[in-house]
Image: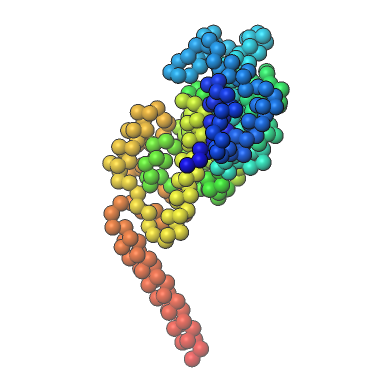
């Protein structure tokens, strides 16, 4: 079977100092991997990147370690520049590029939409640039900003929606990475103003806590404020008529994972609706078990400690969603009663009109 090589594979080979000329002759390269290889060969940057990543930088848990001396926006310009061009910062930039490629390949971003940010100091962060497709990001495209949105380093201009990410990080100190994009099904829920129902799938319940922020013009402080206000108890926020933003206390990949989870979940909810059957929710004890797992992982959820009967509030979900048990018969019975009452009322109206006609 022919080996398929992605852009991520190419970057990993470069980090390990492998010679790109030694790729299998029958290997199939994805378009983005082919573009990256052409760029590396043209610019002669493969060795430079490998040298940077194989330098004597300290390593923690298999990853390059951050600088021992914490930086902030008041640090000397020379130190900020040195950090921004360090192997550690380069590794974070590559992570953003990898996530951008995944977003683009899954069609979670269109045009130059979407943006990502990683906190790297007390009040500084590395972010994506504006007007660049997330599927074709390069480490040298990244920007360093302070928490006021001022750009400190980088050639390209920082994302226009940076304030929202920074306001999330200010409101939620645990947030070290944020991801914003436009996954179609989840964005459809956001456009309809509907928060996905709960108590239906374990992955969604454990890894995601979703809420809906009202629409404001993208990039404005008001939009950022409304989103950030929800970040205390939710790690996934639907932005009305716009898209989705997620945050993580572990890293940018986890923030990206939440996009995959909420998008798959929203798609599943739409399929369940089309089947025309009542969806059965978890029992209170089943939900409590999932919430215990979620709390042990350090993920936020406003339902910790509330009464069991309040765990599954799906009032905003339009299609029928019922609890565990033989609910299909109950729903059918309720429908029959409503239909009978309607028929009776119409019959009475017709009889009354016939009497008047006599």
**Is 94 positioned to the left or the right of 140 in the image?**
left
Observer able to see residue 168: no
In the foreground, 163 or 229: 163
Picture quadrant where residue 305 is located:
top left
Residue 160 position within the rendered picture, expressed as x and y whole percent measured from the top left: 68, 31
Question: 67 left or right of 310?
Answer: right
Q: Nearer the viewer, residue 341 or 275?
A: 275
Residue 341's x, y, as percent? Answer: 39, 71
Residue at image point 58% right, 19% down = 50
Residue 283 is left or right of residue 66, and the answer is left
Count the labels in the image: 0
Q: Residue at point 45% right, 15% down?
A: 60
For residue 172, side relative to residue 109 (left or right): left
Q: How is the image coloured?
A: rainbow
Q: Position of residue 267 (x, y in %)?
A: 48, 49
The residue positioned farthest toward the front in the image shown? 25
Q: Residue 142 or 339: which is nearer the viewer? A: 142
Residue 158 lies, with reference to residue 339, above or below; the image says: above
Is 44 above or below relative to 210?
A: above
Q: Quadrant of residue 241?
A: top right
In percent of the image, x 45 and y 32: which residue is there? 233
Which quadrant of the structure image shows residue 302?
A: top left
* Residue 184 visible in the snapshot: yes
Residue 331 x/y as whole percent: 35, 61
From this view, report whether residue 194 is shown above or below residue 346: above
């Amino acid at each position: 079977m022919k080996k398929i090589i992605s852009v991520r594979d190419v970057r990993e080979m470069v980090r390990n100092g492998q010679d790109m000329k030694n790729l299998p002759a029958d290997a199939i390269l994805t378009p983005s991997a082919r573009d990256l290889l052409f760029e590396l060969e043209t610019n002669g940057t493969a060795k430079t990147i490998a040298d940077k990543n194989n330098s004597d930088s300290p390593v923690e848990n298999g990853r390059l370690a951050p600088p021992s001396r914490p930086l902030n926006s008041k640090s000397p310009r020379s130190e900020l520049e040195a950090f921004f061009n360090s192997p550690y910062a380069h590794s974070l930039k590559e992570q953003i590029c990898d996530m951008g490629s995944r977003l683009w390949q899954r069609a979670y971003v269109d045009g130059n939409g979407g943006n990502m940010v990683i906190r790297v100091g007390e009040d500084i962060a590395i972010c994506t640039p504006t007007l660049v497709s997330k599927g074709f990001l390069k480490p040298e495209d990244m920007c360093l900003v302070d928490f006021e949105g001022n750009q400190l380093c980088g050639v390209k201009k920082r994302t226009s929606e940076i304030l929202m990410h920074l306001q999330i990080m200010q409101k939620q100190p645990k947030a070290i990475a944020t991801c914003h994009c436009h996954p179609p099904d989840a964005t459809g829920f956001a456009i309809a103003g509907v928060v996905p129902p709960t108590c239906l799938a374990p992955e969604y319940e454990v890894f995601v806590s979703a809420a809906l922020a009202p629409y404001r013009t993208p990039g404005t402080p008001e939009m950022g404020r409304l989103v950030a206000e929800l970040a205390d108890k939710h790690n996934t926020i639907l932005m009305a008529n716009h898209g989705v933003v997620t945050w993580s206390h572990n890293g940018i990949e986890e923030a990206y994972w939440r996009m995959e989870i909420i998008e798959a979940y929203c798609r599943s909810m739409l399929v369940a609706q089309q089947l025309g059957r009542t969806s059965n929710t978890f029992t209170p004890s089943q939900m409590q078990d999932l919430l215990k797992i979620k709390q042990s992982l350090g993920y936020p959820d406003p339902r910790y400690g509330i009464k069991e009967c309040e765990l599954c509030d799906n009032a905003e979900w339009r299609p029928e969603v019922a609890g565990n048990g033989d609910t299909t018969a109950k729903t059918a019975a309720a429908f029959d009663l409503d239909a009978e009452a309607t028929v009776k009322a119409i019959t009475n109206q017709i009889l009354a009109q016939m009497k008047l006609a006599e």
